[in-house]
Amino acid sequence: MNKYLLIVVAVAALVGFGAYAQTTGTFKDSRDGKTYKTVKVDGKTWMAQNLNFAAKESECYKNKDANCAKYGRLYDWETANKACPAGFHLPSDDEWTALVNYADGKEKAGRKLKSKACWNNNGNCTDDDDYGWSALPGGVGNSDGYFGAGNIGYWWCATENGATHAWYRDMDSYYAYVRGFDYYKTDLCSVRCVKD
């Protein structure tokens, strides 16, 4: 009887692990030689790190190189649309929505998409980064300065919302949500690239 119980438990563990197993890899950006981790989630290959390509009109948080190394660069929306390397693109609002829905919806997806490290207050995540997407809180920049690194992450969508605004997604160290709002195109957010 105990032998059968052990087999059932072992099979259940393997099935549970397989539910989150993702295809991972790397991609080398030929423009600057930087290598990025990639992960395939729900059939799409995403960079598993924030972009850190030094495009014109991009900045390091508080203009400190160490922040670029840790969180990637921040981009205005126009630059974000051109910053991804060949073969990748800035995800649309629909692509972001599909990712968030796959990761349990906007109320809980942050728990499954956040990195295990670099978030203040442990990021309110499940400490497992279920999909290997490894969201990092790179903060945001605008005309008032910079704020939020360590506590929040903002990522541009390719989808506009009028002449002056575009959609973005955000995650917060205190909550499990992934929200979507529009933001001034001149503000500075992180970029995640998705394969064409």
Image: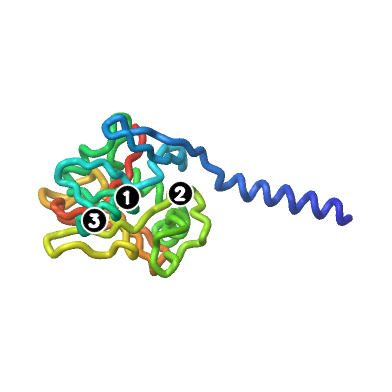
Q: Amino acid at mark 2?
A: Tyr
Which x, y percent locates residue 45? 41, 37
The alpha-carbon separation of the residues under discs 1 and 2 comes to: 29 Å
State which tag comes first along the sequence, 2 or 3. 3
Q: Which residue is mark 1?
A: 69
Count of numbered circles on the image: 3
Q: Of discs 1 and 2, which sits in the foreground?
A: 1
- Of residues 195 and 84, the one nearer the viewer is 84
Give the residue drawn at x 11%, y 61%: 143
Q: Which residue is mark 3?
A: 64
Which x, y percent locates residue 136? 37, 55
Which x, y percent locates residue 14? 67, 47
Q: In this rendering, is residue 36 above or below 186?
A: above
Q: Amino acid at mark 1?
A: Ala
The circle on residue 88 is none
The alpha-carbon separation of the residues under discs 1 and 3 comes to: 9 Å
Relative side of 181 to 103, left or right: left
- Secondary structure at numbered mark 1: helix
- Image quarter for residue 176? bottom left
Q: Amino acid at mark 3?
A: Lys
Give the residue drawn at x 41%, y 45%: 48
Q: Quadrant of the N terminus?
A: bottom right
